[in-house]
Image: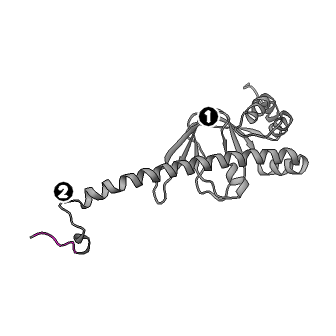
Amino acid sequence: MPARPPSQQTVHATWAPRIAQLLLRQPGHRLTAEDAVLIANQMQVRWMQAGTRFIRQDDDTHDGTILMLLYGEVSVEKAPLHQGDSLVVSIAKAGQMFGEMGVLLDAPRSASCVAYSDVALAELSRESLERLVNEHPGTAARLALGIASRLAEHLRDTSNKLSSMSRLVSAMHPAIRSQMLGPKSGFSPSQLDDPSLPD
């Protein structure tokens, strides 16, 4: 007779201390140890096989869950506009959270997440989050502040990268222009208006 699989309650009791520990390690977190335990007790553990796409970019029909990686690695991917192939933005490891932007902003998912290996995830459903807000508003507020702080930091990093790229493009522009329109190229700006073929 095959062994009975462990109940969700048993699974949760096994993982709850790990979930609370990872919550307290989140960058910019505002949680107390008591907050972390309360949130951990609201989360359910899920497993995904390698190759499973569990969040899809631009999905606006998601169920409003926040996920935290407990074990394994996840590939975070973004598909450029009007292109089918996704680019791997990062490989997330234990402690990384997913889906919090979509929940806080009630917006479509900003990236896809694919299980790079077999993974274990802790899930905080929208219903559990609402229960947390109603029963423990201070804890919910500190959780939201920590998430907002991380999102602001990501935005600052992205802004800095864009600024660096803009400076690089500006520095390269004169060189590119001289290569395209300079005397050595054999290409004249007048050909832009009258691109006649040579005899």
Q: Secondary structure at mark 2?
A: helix
Q: Position of residue 81 (x, y in %)?
A: 49, 59
Q: Which mark is residue 48?
A: none
Please state the extent of the stretch shown in magenta in the rendering.
194-198
Q: Which residue is mark 2?
A: 184
Quarter-of-image position of residue 3:
top right
The answer to if 58 sits in the magenta stretch is no
Q: Quadrant of the C terminus?
A: bottom left
Precedes in sequence: disc 1 or disc 2 = 1
Q: Residue at x 81, y 51 (%)?
A: 127
Q: Residue at x 87, y 46 (%)?
A: 138
Q: Secondary structure at mark 1?
A: loop
Q: Which mark is residue 93?
A: 1
Q: Is residue 192 left or right of residue 160?
A: left
User: Across the whole image, how many numbered discs are drawn on residues?
Assistant: 2
Question: Which secondary structure is most common in the magenta stretch?
Answer: loop
